[in-house]
Image: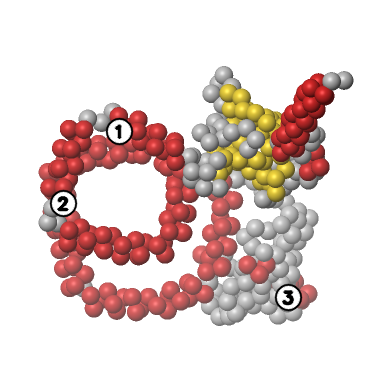
Amino acid sequence: MRPDTARLLAGLATIIAIAAIVALAVGLFRSSFTPTVPVTVVSPRAGLVMNPDARVKMLGVQVGKVASIEALPDGQAALHLAMDPSQLHLIPANVLVDITSSTVFGAKFVELMPPAEPSPQPMYAGQVLDADHVTVEINTVFEELTSVLAKIDPAKLNETLGAIASALNGRGHKIGQTLSDLDALLAKIDPSLANLSHDLAVAPGVFNAYADAAPDLIKTADNATRISQTIVDEQHNLDALLVSAIGLADIGNDVVGTNRQPLTDVLHLLVPTTDLTNQYNPALTCGLAGLVPLAINQPAPVPGTIQTQSFVLGVERYRYPKNLPKVAATGGPHCQDQGLPNLPFEKRPPFVVTDNGSNPWQYGNQGILLNSDALKQWLFGPLDGPPRNTAQIGQPG
């Protein structure tokens, strides 16, 4: 081989070796020889400073990079991520995604955040995630501000700013006092912010309740309007009623004032009677309640009278003077103690013996009523006078 050809081949080999070394370095720098797992993130927008090769981090550790960015037809952006397979098993499948930046002007990166309840399933190849939040760049703010300023007429803006300057001229002290008062007001409101937050939280429920009750409230207001109109229409009659009521009150005041002492004496005299009535309140209650069945029971099915007959001997009639009525019973009422007035079925209340001049179970004639009083005395011993009827009570005999 000629020397010129050898030098040419040696130079070509050197160039190829240098190119291979540079390509290998670039590939190693871009992780072209590192195996990755594809994952897609769908975001409302990628942002102005989101570029391919942007980092994908989780808890500050890089777990992948952005392979490419694709604009979707609906205006959203699809970020194709190249995830590190060795880190994939540490990332839950329900991980949260934010597109953020470290500074206002810095480039964006994908931040993976662990959820409150991580799923047991790890992230897998081909998974599609939704971005929850995209940081607004200062570039976007400037762009929106520029679009707004482009629609403002400079002359009108200058005129407006001049009017504001004229309005504020010489009022610095008042504005400062206003700001100071506002600061004091906010300081007073600050302890009540928790209550205000609670009120705002429950306000929708209250407003919904008022909205549901709005028809009834409107109807009530309508009825109140009609009532007010009726009062206006009948104001003369209402005036006459009030004048009559005043006159009645004056007469009542005169009557009560004049008879104040007699009314007081009557009330004092009624105290023993009311005390006794109060003492026998259970007996009166039983008696009145016992009259209710007699008032509501059905009448006899046939006209006439009902007579109860029995083979049991009748009870002796009253005798004079032993059975004269008297008021000597003591001990108070026993009505409710015996279960009255609502007596159970087939139950008879016990007889309470009291000193009132009558005793159906007294010693002597227990029910045999014969025509011969001498036979009674011979059989049962001395008895009081002969039986008397109602017309004869109180006569000697």
Q: Residues within 10 Å of mark 1 (few under 14, many from 20)?
A: few
Q: Quadrant of the N terminus?
A: top right
Mark 2–mark 1 distance (CA, rounded to whole Å): 24 Å
**Would you say the residues marked 2 and 3 are in contact, meaning their CB atoms lie under 8 Å apart?**
no
Q: Is residue 319 visible?
A: no
Mark 3–mark 1 distance (CA, rounded to whole Å): 127 Å
Q: Position of residue 24 (x, y in %)?
A: 76, 34
Q: Residues within 10 Å of mark 2 (few under 14, many from 20)?
A: few
The three-letter code of the residue at mark 3 reads Gly
Q: Which mark is residue 168?
A: 2
**Would you say the residues marked 2 and 1 are in contact, meaning their CB atoms lie under 8 Å apart?**
no
Q: Is 61 positioned to the left or the right of 246 in the image?
A: right
Residue position marked by numbered label 1 in the rendering:
149
The three-letter code of the residue at mark 1 reads Leu
Nearer to me, 183 or 61? 61
Q: Position of residue 228 (x, y in %)?
A: 22, 41
Q: Residues within 10 Å of mark 3 (few under 14, many from 20)?
A: some
Q: Residue at x 59, y 33 (%)?
A: 51
Mark 2–mark 3 distance (CA, rounded to whole Å): 121 Å
State which tag comes first along the sequence, 3 or 1. Answer: 1
Task: Report the label total.
Answer: 3
Q: Which mark is residue 301?
A: none
Q: Residue at x 31, y 75 (%)?
A: 266
Which residue occupies the extreme front position in the image? 3
Q: Secondary structure at mark 1?
A: helix
Residue position marked by numbered label 3 in the rendering:
364
Give the quarter of the image for residue 23.
top right
Q: Residue at x 12, y 47 (%)?
A: 166
Q: Is residue 144 visible?
A: yes
